[in-house]
Image (cartoon, grey):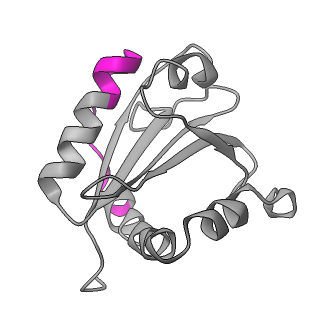
Amino acid sequence: MIYNLPPTLTRVGRYDAPLERAVKEFSEPLEPITFGLGNTMKYCTFQETEPPYLLIVSRQIEGEVTAAGYNVMLTVTSRSDLRNSEIADQFEKETGIKLNLAVPSQINTQNQMIGLAFLAFEKNPLGAMTFLKRRENRR
């Protein structure tokens, strides 16, 4: 585990409708991003509120469900575990996506690296978002 990174909260669930429909219901604007694997639809927002937070939500494009029973994942990173929980709860309430399944420990561990992205957003929000939206990242 890498220390001194802001904590990342991960929640997973099942959502069978298009993710685009749900993200439109969230009170903060979410932008589509292309960074990472090409088999997921991902949206991101970085809010410079106090304290700031980075939210990323993704869903398998085909809606395929993992062996653990989920097809949608939410991560929230800030400098506060409480803030992460508040934002995740707000996202669930506003979008109607229930993120109530057990998160595999490997996924939790991997997602802690999102703290690095959070640090990049803190220093240069526009540059970090531009990087995540680059087309050539699609595989």
Residue projecting furthest to the bottom: 3
Q: Position of residue 95 (x, y in %)?
A: 41, 19
Residue 23: say if magenta.
Answer: no
Which residue does the image show at 43% across and 76% down from the upper left?
A: 119
Task: Identify the image quadrant of residue 135.
Answer: bottom right
Residue 47 visible within the image: yes
Where 95 sits versus 108, above or below?
A: above
Task: Identify the image quadrant of residue 51.
Answer: bottom left
Residue bounds of the magenta highlight: 91-106
Q: Position of residue 65 (x, y in %)?
A: 53, 30
Residue 101: say if magenta.
Answer: yes
Q: Please state, as top left, top right, bottom left or bottom right, where the C terminus lies in the image.
A: bottom right
Q: Please state, as top left, top right, bottom left or bottom right, where the N terminus lies in the image.
A: bottom left
In the picture, measured across the screen, residue 17 lies left or right of residue 50, that is: right
In the picture, measured across the screen, residue 6 lies left or right of residue 120, that is: left
Residue 100 visible within the image: no
Which residue does the image show at 12% across and 51% down from the upper left?
A: 82
Which residue does the image show at 28% across and 33% down from the upper left?
A: 101
